[in-house]
Amino acid sequence: MLKQTLHHRRQKLATLINFPVILWSGNTNPRNFPANVYPFRASSHFLYFAGLPLPNAAIRLEAGKLELFIDNPTPSSALWHGEMPTRDEIAEQIGADTARPMAELESSLEGVATIPVQNAATWTQQTQLLNRWVLPQQPPQENDLELAQAIISLRLTHDADALIELRKAAAVTVEAHKAGIAATSQAQREAEVRAAMEAVIIGENMTTSYNSIVTVHGEVLHNEQYHHPLQPGDLILADVGAETAMGWAADVTRTWPVSGKFSSTQRDIYDVVLAAHDACIAKISPGVEYEDIHLLAATVIAEGLVDLGILQGNPADLVEMDAHALFFPHGIGHLLGLDVHDMEDLGDLAGYEEGRNRSSRFGLGYLRLNRPLRPGMLVTIEPGFYQVPAILNDPNVRSKYENVVNWQRLAEFADVRGIRIEDDVLVTDSGSEVLTDALPSQAIAIETSPK
Ligand code: GLY
Ligand code: MN
Ligand code: MN
């Protein structure tokens, strides 16, 4: 990240608030004993202003000035982890005005606002040092709330340097999906397809931005099992995204047939999901309400299912009664940036425009973003169709929707467990740009992509 960009972000924050801020990066998390740790992921708010994934560091921001708190590497860390940059070298790299040891943080806390980090050891430390509750589960209060709102207003739209990183993550993700499709004909199990996809990401010195979903059981929305064998009639749903070394994410899903060719029932449903995907992307433009894009997806899916004889009735009425959600139970997408669900550590503060709250409707309650779109926002568009036993076998659901679902007709689509098509879409001044459109989504292009 350019020093100048980090400086500019800090200056912009200074125009929005008039109190000091401390942002902690977080610590490493032990896996099973202290020296064996999970891969470190710095807090996204810290990364946004400091630009480097530094463990066990903090930054104090006041009136555009940056004070870095971090300890110099110890001789034993040089033995085990190699030579690391000194505090002063890091300070120079990120454009800090001053740099001090972590122990001096304690004397710089007067009147500061903060954001709780996800790492439990660090938020305990935040709570102790600030002598007030700082818990990720609690909505922020007073200056912490004002700080969260100020940071949201900056991070909602992406600057040029962020977009460079986001495009890198998108490009590598596209290649990972191509590798997954190509690896399928030789693979026996889901795990082998996952390995081929993640190999591309790891080979670019990136990580995955969330746990990969690579499954023949696409009806399990966040399936994290990879042991199932691949059978010729199966569809593979792969939701895999790369994250750059500086923390910027991509989030892409494709669904393809193990045999290389969709069955006619799979193709019919695939084309319904694709029609929703394409219609939503075509509608993305500044000023458009994201909720309307979700409702557009719901309507296109309802229309498609009526055409196939699975649903019965008028599509608008079906959406009104949430019948689309029997098969498309999640939202059309979310914000994307440093987090795959960007700023969801702040609950719905980022995703929902002030004064708006989650709907209690089955067909709207899982919508993660409810704001008018603005140029520079990056969102996902990810319609899907799933046959989730927990929904479709629920006696209350079956009786409520008895007359709108043709259950006999639905049974003919038993080889479609789950389909999702997900792309990353930047809102531009005049419409949108799909950052991941180098990855085909048409059924025929998927069938003919290199194997
Ligand atoms: N990969 C998680 C999601 O699509 O939201
Ligand atoms: Mn997503
Ligand atoms: Mn996804």
Image (cartoon, grey):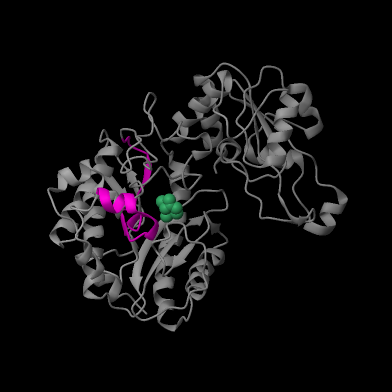
Question: For residue 143, which quarter of the picture?
Answer: top right
338 is within the stretch colored magenta? no
Q: Residue at x 44, y 68 (%)?
A: 215
Q: Tell me where residue 305 appears, x and y as whole percent.
A: 19, 58
The relative height of residue 238 versus residue 402 in the rendered view (above or below) is: below
Image location (x, y in percent) of residue 270: 26, 64
Q: Is residue 101 visible?
A: no
Residue 206 place in picture, x, y as percent: 55, 59
Residue at the far right: name it. Answer: 75
Q: Is residue 291 left or right of residue 72?
A: left
Q: Quadrant of the C terminus?
A: bottom left
Q: Is residue 95 above or below residue 278?
A: above
Q: Residue at x 50, y 69 (%)?
A: 194
Which residue is at the front of the view, 53 or 149?
Answer: 149
Q: Can residue 444 be seen at all in this image of the molecule? A: yes
Locate residue 264: give its quadrant. Answer: bottom left
Q: Is residue 161 left or right of residue 133?
A: left
Vertical position of residue 32 compared to residue 55: above or below? below
Q: How many marks?
A: 0
Q: Which residue is rendered at x = 53% and y = 53% of the image?
A: 244
Q: Which residues are magenta?
A: 373-400
Q: Does 391 appear in magenta?
A: yes
Work out which quarter of the rendered image holds the N terminus and state it.
Answer: top right
Q: Nearer the viewer, residue 6 or 423?
A: 423
Q: Is residue 155 left or right of residue 108?
A: left
**How far from the left and from the top, in percent, is residue 383?**
31, 53
